[in-house]
Amino acid sequence: MDDRDREHEFEDGTRDEDALLGPDSDVAEASKLVGGKPGIWVWMLVVSAGISGLLFGYDTAIISSALLQLANPPPSSTIPALTVGQQSLVTSITSISALISSLGSGPISEYGRKKAIFLAAIVFILGAVSQSVADSVGGLVVGRFIVGLGVGAGSAVVPLYITELSPAHLRSRLNTLNTVFITLGQIVAYLIGYWYSRTPFGWRPMFLLGGVPAAIQIGLLFFLPESPRWLIQHGHVEQATSVLARVYGIRLEDSNQVDRRMLSHLVRGIERGVKSENELEGTYAKWKSLLGKRSNRRALLISGGLQGFQQLCGFNALMYFSSLIYAMLDFKNPTLTSLSVAATNFAFTLVSLILIPKVGKRRLLLYSVPMMALGLLCAAFGFHKLPSQQISEKVVASTRKDADPVSSFYAYVILASTTFYVAAYASGIGNVPWQQAEFFPMSVRSLGTAIATACNWSSNFIIGETFLGLMDKMGAVATFVLFAVICTIGWCGIYVIYPDTEGMNLEEIEALLNLEILVATSSSPIIQPSTASINHSMVIPIGHDVY
């Protein structure tokens, strides 16, 4: 027996089987090996962290209801009626600041995932207060910019935090649960928007209430543990072991010998991963590894591409401006009608929670994206049958108190089509991209997820800044057809580059991304679990590195 074999041998002579957990294997893989089962503590932990998702959803959706009031303010308002350009700026500036903070979240999270979430909560509160007291368009822009900093940081760090704590068989569901919180926040935003829709200056409490969940989260953070990976990285091995034991439902005082061995093995595996990460000293070294290694380049292409497509397909155009769109269509209460968007998004996010482990992420995307395109084309048909009118004129006319809106049949066609589109979106592309951390090894995970999240927010900015202008200049028909074309292009990209990673540990995912392949063409596993062996009959060779 050589030195390497002795290194992986337990005191009683049995072997630790190092192949089961390599240096970059995820904490999640331990759940396949230990005897305990994750308990309620894990779910409470994710719920506490998921409040960031709730805030994310609330602050991106509440602007839809607020814009209706800001487009036609009372005479005593110090803020004049917002033009189309000002509405776009107030909306899109949040994406710019979220882009900035998501890029900065990587270095910040190195000081602790928990600290980064705490900082995001503080920023959420500051943003909520500054928006609510704004007395000028500039003040609104500043408030929206501040709250965007919290949104961007939370959207990058929370999925990373959840991924580093989740058992492999629950990783997809727990990350999807974070998305459930985002959609729940959107529902809350529309309900509060409806509640204050007839209140003069109702947009002020709409914005202010966004700080309440952040204050609750700050209290809950005192009960949350730090990421085991971060703890081991900073020498707190005993504390990390205790956290892992609680995550996997193991009582250290009476656990069996196998559980203790696997926990010890897991800690040693993380220590080797930390050692590998520490070898990349400095930002330049991490960038070099991220862009220089085949598997990391592909991880960045896949995760960044999905995040960009998630926004460019047009969903947040509905989330930001649905109240304005339904006001154009003469619905009596456009804010309440907009609730259909948020409610559908929430319901089908729960559906995806069930479908992802059964169907797989790749197949779910390939099935749902064509349905999104169909919904957009049906909405374009409905707009084609309605008389055209500039959006700014139509919104002002629809929000006057003396208006008596009556929706036509084709307005309901558009409502049904957009609802169908949202259902398809929530089932697939609305959730899958946020599980991006699983593509990156520990050494570049913070940097990789930060860049991928930045792709989301840069695309989000494009949609927020251009949608109303497109509707005003090109017309609704051309705008919705354009989004349908983007969906078609996105589907082709998913078919070509996106593999199904459901049930794989991170070591297996990295092995897959290192191959000279595109994707699997079968629903069967490409890599047999815990062996990292490739079934070459199920992949498409391409002969050279195109990534």
Image (cartoon, rainbow, N blue to C red):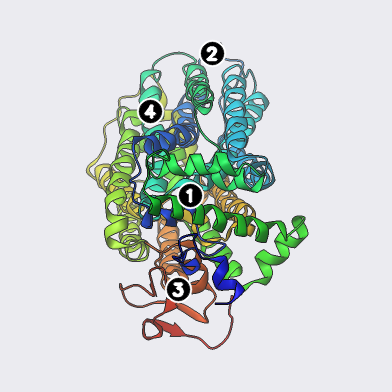
Q: Is residue 293 above or below residue 505?
A: below
Q: Residue at x 33, y 46 (%)?
A: 37
Could you tell me if the residues under marks 4 and 3 are in contact, i.e. CB atoms within 8 Å? no
- Name the N-terminal-most of marks 4 and 2: 2
- Viewer-proximal residue among 228 and 359: 228
Q: CA distance from mark 1 to mark 4?
A: 26 Å
Look at label 1 and name its amino acid: Thr
Q: Residue furthest bottom?
A: 543
Q: Is residue 151 above or below residue 472?
A: above
Q: Which residue is mark 3?
A: 532
Q: Is residue 537 left or right of residue 56?
A: left
In the image, which is nearer the foreground, mark 2 or mark 1?
1
* Image location of residue 178, percent across then percent down: 42, 42
Look at label 3 and name its amino acid: Ala
Q: Which residue is mark 4?
A: 188
Q: CA distance from mark 3 to mark 1?
A: 20 Å
Q: Is residue 470 left or right of residue 427?
A: right
User: Of the numbered discs in the image, which one, if any, rests on residue 338?
Assistant: none
Label 2 sits on a secondary structure element that is: loop
- Name the N-terminal-most of marks 2 and 1: 2
Q: CA distance from mark 4 to mark 2?
A: 29 Å
Could you tell me if the residues under marks 1 and 4 are in contact, i.e. CB atoms within 8 Å? no
Q: Which residue is mark 2?
A: 75
Could you tell me if the residues under marks 4 and 2 are in contact, i.e. CB atoms within 8 Å? no
Label 3 sits on a secondary structure element that is: loop
Q: Residue at x 52, y 55 (%)?
A: 437
Q: CA distance from mark 2 to mark 1?
A: 50 Å
* Image location of residue 5, percent across then percent down: 54, 72
Label 1 sits on a secondary structure element that is: helix
Q: Is residue 178 left or right of residue 427?
A: right
